[in-house]
Image: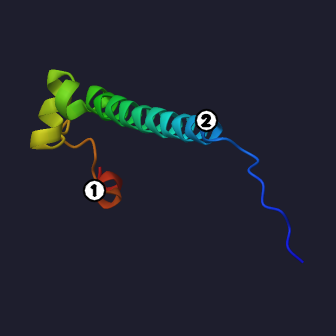
Amino acid sequence: MRFPVTKTTTDDHIASALGAQTGGYGFASFSYIVGSVLLFFAAIYISPMFCGSVFEKKMMWKGAVEIEPGYAKNMDEADKV
């Protein structure tokens, strides 16, 4: 038994559906790229290496400096005093 084949949609509906789908993909790509760029610049902005104070930059490049000599003694030396 053969069923009659009828056209249920027109070419205009198919073209508008493909146009809407293309526009959606374009907006999704735009949003992804803008979000990635914003996150990249936010990471640079909060990084102490690039946008930190003078002391933060010094600590990043030279390492931490002990404020008072003998402040961080080990427990054996602390017991002898």
- Tell me the SS state at disc 2: helix
C-alpha distance separating marks 2 and 1: 86 Å
Amino acid type of the residue that numbered disc 1 sits on in the rendered structure: Glu
Q: Nearer the viewer, residue 57 or 19?
A: 19
> In this rendering, is residue 23 above or below 63?
above
Q: Which mark is residue 31?
A: none
Amino acid type of the residue that numbered disc 2 sits on in the rendered structure: Asp
Q: Is residue 20 left or right of residue 53?
A: right
Colour scheme shown:
rainbow
Residue farthest toward the left in the current orientation of the protein = 62
Q: Residue at x 40, y 32 (%)?
A: 30
Provide the residue designation for mark 2. 12
Q: Which mark is residue 77?
A: 1
Q: Residue at x 58, y 34 (%)?
A: 16
Quadrant of res 14: top right
Q: Is residue 52 left or right of residue 27?
A: left
Q: Residue at x 55, y 40 (%)?
A: 21
Q: Residue at x 17, y 36 (%)?
A: 59
Of the 4 image quadrants, the one containing the N terminus is bottom right
